[in-house]
Image (cartoon, helix red, strand yellow):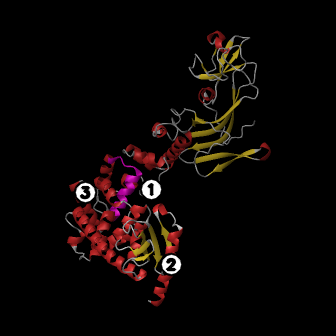
């Protein structure tokens, strides 16, 4: 096939050997009883059949003494396993497919190429065929990416892609690998001062789809932005690797050539940041915190981040901003966190502020910036809850009387019905019958609904069924244990009760 690649760069030496050694999904030990030899398709070694006499006598490689069909054996040369295969049978259609990625340096340019490969096992020594699908050329002046476009009737062409990156492998070529040929890839090129080896192995185990994409981003960054080399030489390798991983931040000015301008901080901050070995996330936290607390130093970032960057809804945050000096508040919370070792957050403060407002306290400096915030917080929350409980209990009883019109129980036959008297009764009912009526306390206290208890006359204190009436006097539901429905006798009881209840509401 005609070589119509944009750049006709020769493949690295040893590429075929690498594919056979590392990229075969299934290697074979091809044996010939006639020639008394075995060939390993992984390392290419030939050795006498006498070294593995048990693989003879069966076309599919079975050992005569074992009732098994496909047993892998170990090559004595490369110490890798392979499936025994008779040289006389079943290799004409035997193929293996995959994708190999390699790099080479030419002049000042660094080239990356992605090839699909096919391993053909027709000959005892397998042949490897390549089909280029992508090329990337990297220099300081230009960074180019070319992808091959497979067209109709087997025709194809190449087109340039603006975004520099690794093309995803086709599903048919499920196996993908990287030719480990990077040690001299940057020598003499515009990347000769780049820390290519660190970019390669930064995250441990190699996965070419992730790692090579990260490596390409690093090399592109190094060529486009002098700030990359400045950051590396100044001890900020983590920021460089974060960018290679695809992270971006408006607080990192890669077009600048001065370290203070790159990080958007002053000289003292640069020295402090170097000791922190900051990530992009740390740098963003520093700038975001300084919007609220301009006095914050680099050493304060982690603690202030824990204090300020917790989830707090916008309504609560607006309340805090409206009534306090957030900068002064953060300083106060940081001092208390360091003094007590307790984890204090803006969300905790918002809860405290909400409580003192409900209590009607004067919002002076003593209240807004208490000396012992945690103690003040706990006391205010407890007092506010007690006040709410008292108010809820009064409203609960009030709306129960208004909706039901009942002061006490009504008895018909063996059953009675009465309104719940207190929120605690709903909690007890919910626990006894294992249903969710306890969650209706707020709705009852707001006059949105009403809860009645149905009991057996002989057991007036034992929960039996729970009924809900809405504010319009309509029955919504009636549930027993585990939300079960009511039996016939209870249904008849409810029908009689509702008839009289509606009559009473009409005449009320």
Whether the residues at callouts 3 and 1 have beta carbons within 8 Å, the answer is: no
Residue under numbered circle 2:
496
Residue toward you, 124 or 412: 412
Where disc 1 sits, the SS reads: loop
Q: Residue at x 75, y 21 (%)?
A: 89
- For the point 43% across and 50% down, the residue is 227
Q: Compared with residue 435, is residue 44 higher up or lower down, i.e. above or below?
A: above
**CA gap, disc 3 and disc 1:** 29 Å
Bin the neighbour count of mark 1 within 10 Å (Cα to Cα): few under 14, some 14-19, many 20 and up. few
Residue 469 visible from this viewpoint? yes
Residue 337 disc label: 3
Q: Earlier in the sequence, mark 2 or mark 3?
A: 3
312 or 65: nearer the viewer? 65
Question: Could you give the CA–CA distance between mark 2 and mark 1, rounded to whole angstroms?
Answer: 70 Å
Above or below residue 335? Residue 314 is below
Q: Residue at x 27, y 66 (%)?
A: 329
**Badge 3: residue crowd in 10 Å (few <14, some 14–19, many ≥20):** some
Q: Please say if 461 is above or below 7.
A: below
- Whether residue 230 is visible, yes or no, is no
Residue 402 x %, y %: 40, 83
- Tell me the residue that label 1 is attached to: 249
- How far apart, in angstroms, are the residues tagged by discs 2 and 3? 63 Å
Q: Which residues are magenta?
A: 276-291
Q: Which mark is residue 162?
A: none
> Mark 3 falls on what kind of element?
helix
Answer left or right for 447 relative to 26.
left
Question: Observer-nearest residue: 238 or 410?
Answer: 410
């Amino acid at each position: 096939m005609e070589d119509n690649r944009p750049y006709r760069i020769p493949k690295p030496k040893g590429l075929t050997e690498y594919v056979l050694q590392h990229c075969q999904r299934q290697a074979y030990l091809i044996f010939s009883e006639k020639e008394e030899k075995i060939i390993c398709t992984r390392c290419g070694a030939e050795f006498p059949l006498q070294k593995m006499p048990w693989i003879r006598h069966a076309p599919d490689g079975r050992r005569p003494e074992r009732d098994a069909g496909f047993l892998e054996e170990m090559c004595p040369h490369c110490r890798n396993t392979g499936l025994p295969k008779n040289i006389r049978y079943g290799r004409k259609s035997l193929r293996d497919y995959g994708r190999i990625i390699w790099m080479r340096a030419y002049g000042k340019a660094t080239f990356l190429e992605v090839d699909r490969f096919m391993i053909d096992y027709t000959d005892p020594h397998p042949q490897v065929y390549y089909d280029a699908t992508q090329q990337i050329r990297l220099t300081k002046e230009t960074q180019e990416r070319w992808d091959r476009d497979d067209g109709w009737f087997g025709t194809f062409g190449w087109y340039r892609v603006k975004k520099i990156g690794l093309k995803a492998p086709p599903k048919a070529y499920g196996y993908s690998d990287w030719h480990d040929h990077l040690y001299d890839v940057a020598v003499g090129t515009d990347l000769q001062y780049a820390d290519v080896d660190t970019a390669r192995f930064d995250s441990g185990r190699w996965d070419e789809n992730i790692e090579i994409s990260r490596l390409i981003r690093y090399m592109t960054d190094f060529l486009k932005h002098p700030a990359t080399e400045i950051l590396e030489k100044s001890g900020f390798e983590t920021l460089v690797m974060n960018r290679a991983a695809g992270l971006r931040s408006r607080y990192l000015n890669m077009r600048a050539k001065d370290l203070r301008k790159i990080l958007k901080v002053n000289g003292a901050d640069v020295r402090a940041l170097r000791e922190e070995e900051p990530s992009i996330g740390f740098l963003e936290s520093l700038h975001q915190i300084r919007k609220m607390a301009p006095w914050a130093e680099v050493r304060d970032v982690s603690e202030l981040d824990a204090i300020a960057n917790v989830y707090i809804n916008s309504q609560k945050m607006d309340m805090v901003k409206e009534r306090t000096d957030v900068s002064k508040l953060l300083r106060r919370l940081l001092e208390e966190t360091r003094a007590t070792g307790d984890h204090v957050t803006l969300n905790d403060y918002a809860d405290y502020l909400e409580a003192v407002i409900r209590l009607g306290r004067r919002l002076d400096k003593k209240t807004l910036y208490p000396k012992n915030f945690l103690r003040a917080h706990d006391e205010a929350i407890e007092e506010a809850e007690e006040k709410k409980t008292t108010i809820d209990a009064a409203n609960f009883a009030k709306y129960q009387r208004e909706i039901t019109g009942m002061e006490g129980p009504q008895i018909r036959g063996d059953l009675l019905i009465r309104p719940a008297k207190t929120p605690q009764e709903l909690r007890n009912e919910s626990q006894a019958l294992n249903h969710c009526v306890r969650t209706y306390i707020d709705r009852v206290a707001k006059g949105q609904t009403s809860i009645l208890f149905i009991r057996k006359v002989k057991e007036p204190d034992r929960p039996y069924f729970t009924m809900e009436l809405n504010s319009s006097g309509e029955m919504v539901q009636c549930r027993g244990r585990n939300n079960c429905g009511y039996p016939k006798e209870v249904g008849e009881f409810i029908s009689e009760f509702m008839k009289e209840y509606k009559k009473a509401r009409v005449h009320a």
